[in-house]
Amino acid sequence: MSVINLKAHYDGKQVCLDEPIDPVPNTPMLVTVARPDAEGADRAEWFALAKAAFARAYGDDEPDYSHCIGKMPPSE
């Protein structure tokens, strides 16, 4: 099954796709609603989750890889 993400909006009556698509009848779809009124709270929760994940992945005892950033690998 191929999955794609499309932008859409609600016009007060129905969900309107913002991008062209040609689905066949009865195509299953998953709808995720991003409520504007909860954006600040959601953003804070996602930030806290990401911060905790980065803290686990990059602890104080990790080596410093900053010297590797932005350099091209040697050519063969």
Image (cartoon, helix red, strand yellow):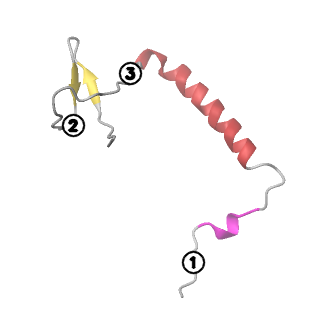
Q: Secondary structure at mark 3?
A: loop
Which label's residue is closer to the chain start, 3 or 1?
3
Looking at the rendered structure, the kind of residue marked 1 is Pro
54 lies left or right of 42: right
Q: Is residue 27 magenta?
A: no
The answer to whether residue 40 is above or below residue 65 is: above
* Residue 43 % position (x, y): 54, 27
Q: What's the mark number on residue 33?
A: 3
Looking at the rendered structure, the kind of residue marked 2 is Glu
Q: Which residue occupies the extreme top position in the image? A: 13
Q: Secondary structure at mark 2?
A: loop
Residue 71, picture quadrant = bottom right
* Residue 23 % position (x, y): 18, 34
Which label's residue is closer to the chain start, 2 or 1?
2
Dot 1 alpha-carbon crowd within 10 angstroms: few under 14, some 14 to 19, many 20 or more: few
Looking at the rendered structure, the kind of residue marked 3 is Val
Quadrant of the image containing the C terminus: bottom right
Q: What's the mark number on residue 73?
A: 1
Quadrant of the image containing the N terminus: top left
* Residue 9 % position (x, y): 27, 24
Query: Residues in magenta?
Result: 64-69
Measure the alpha-carbon separation of dots 2 and 3: 17 Å
Q: What's the mark number on residue 19?
A: 2
Residue 41, picture quadrant = top right
Q: Secondary structure at mark 1?
A: loop
Residue 70, picture quadrant = bottom right
